Each structure stands twice: as C-alpha cells, then as structure tokens.
C-alpha cells in the first residue's frame, strides 16, 4: 500500500507525475480539481456551490475540500494506495488530514516562479474537447488545431498573468506553511521539477524507494 500526497505550484508537472505513479504502481489518482470539475459538470449541489465560490474569485473553503476528499477516500477503491493531487491547500487542511489518515510521503515538486509563468503562458486548451496542450512540451501536430478532434486551441481563461500571479502568491502564502508540518513529521520528499518528466519520475521513485517500473503510458 502506497499513500502519497503530491504538491507543487501550477505547471510543476505534479499532475503528470501523479498519473505516472498511478500507471506504474496501480495507485488511484485523486485530483481535487477533477473532483470539483466533475461536480460542476454533473450539476450537483456541491458543484453549484463551488462554481459560485470560484466565480467570485474566492478559494473553496476548507470544510468543503475536506468533505470532498473524505467522501472520495471512503469509496475504498484504492487497493494498492492513492496519490492525492492538489491537496492540501493550506496548513489547516494538512493538520486535519493527518488526524484521520496515515500517509507514506508528501512529494513536493519545485519549480521557480519564472518557470511557472513560462509554462502557463505556453498552455493551450482545445475549446471543443478540453484536451490540454503545451507549446513547449506537448505541441499539436498542426499549429492551433487539436490533434484529436480538430477543434481550435485557445488560451485558458484562467491563465492570464494576473490570475497566475495571484495563484502563485496563494501557493507561497497558504500552501508553503503546510510543508513545515510535513517536514517535522519526516514525510517530505522534494524533487526539482525543472527537468524532463522522465528524470523527475526517476528521482521521485528513487527517493520513495520504489522499484522502477516501466511506464505503461
Ligand atoms: Zn479537441
């Protein structure tokens, strides 16, 4: 059983690394962002609440986040473990989580703010099917056109420099204090995210003492 949290600023590649861990070790990848998006898409009561909060430019309150995580983990479909992505957002959520769950490690992927900007501003999304592209790492075959559905690639609405600056500030101010807690509990593993996804993956595997496995993807 492997139970991990994976954290890092936007563009650190934590989603990619979470998916690689999932694929290689049969873990369940639980993305808080995906859970919220699912609820919004399916027009649940929670989705409506989250949508209102986000539209007002506010952060989703701790109790909603805790509730979503708890409900998801109670499904107990994670026979080999899980990797929780996008959580916790702050020290309170971290403390609350550690009261209820044992985890094996917290993986933090570091990238400097300048790289966060570079990567985010290179990001495009298909306005038709929602597939993500990156003009640096994952380029479409034809410029501006989705490989899968032929839809138009556009800049994400929330990738403006102002929104990005705000999210980064939030990460430094709110999320970073949680790392002190994880460090004192000797759970923290730090990887430099300014490398290829393969290199970051090997580093994380080595630090976690995981036997390297070929990446099925
Ligand atoms: Zn598409």
Image (cartoon, rainbow, N blue to C red):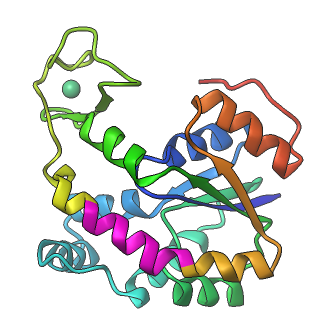
- Taking the image as shown, residue 121 lies to the left or right of residue 172, namely left
- Residue 128: x and y, percent? 13, 32
- In this rendering, position of residue 62 left or right of residue 23: left
Give the residue displayed 14% in from the left and 19% down from the top: 144
Q: Is residue 42 visible?
A: no
Q: Is residue 27 above or below residue 59?
A: above
Up/down of 77 relative to 132, above or below: below
Can residue 155 be spotted in the picture? yes
Is 17 placed above or below 95 here?
A: above
Quick check: which quadrant has ligand 1? top left
Overall secondary structure of the magenta section: helix
Q: Residue furthest top?
A: 142
- At which x and y percent is residue 106? 69, 64
Report the quarter where the C terminus lies: top right
Residue sitting at 59 percent across and 68 percent down?
A: 75
For the residue pair 38 and 191, the one nearer the viewer reads as: 191
Say whether residue 173 is magenta. yes
Give the residue at x 32% y 19%.
139
Which segment did they paint magenta?
Answer: 165-176
């Amino acid at each position: 059983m492997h139970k991990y949290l994976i954290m890092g600023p936007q563009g650190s590649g934590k989603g990619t690394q979470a998916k690689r861990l999932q694929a290689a070790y049969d873990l369940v990848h639980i993305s808080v962002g995906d859970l919220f998006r699912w609820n919004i898409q399916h027009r649940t009561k929670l989705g409506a609440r989250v949508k209102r909060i986000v539209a007002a430019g506010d952060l989703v309150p701790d109790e909603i986040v805790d509730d979503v995580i708890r409900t998801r983990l109670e499904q107990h479909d994670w026979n080999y473990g899980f990797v929780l992505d996008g959580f916790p957002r702050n020290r309170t959520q971290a403390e609350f989580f550690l009261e209820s769950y044992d985890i094996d490690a917290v993986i933090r992927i570091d990238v400097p703010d300048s790289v966060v900007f570079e990567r985010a501003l290179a990001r495009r999304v298909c306005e038709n099917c929602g597939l993500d592209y990156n003009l640096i790492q994952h380029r479409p075959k034809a410029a501006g056109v989705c490989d899968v559905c032929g839809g138009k690639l556009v800049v994400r609405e929330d990738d403006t420099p102002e929104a990005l600056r705000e999210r980064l500030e939030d990460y430094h101010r709110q999320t970073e204090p949680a790392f002190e807690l994880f460090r004192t509990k000797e759970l923290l593993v730090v990887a430099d995210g300014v490398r290829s996804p393969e290199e970051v993956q090997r580093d994380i595997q080595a630090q976690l003492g995981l036997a390297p496995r070929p990446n099925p993807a």
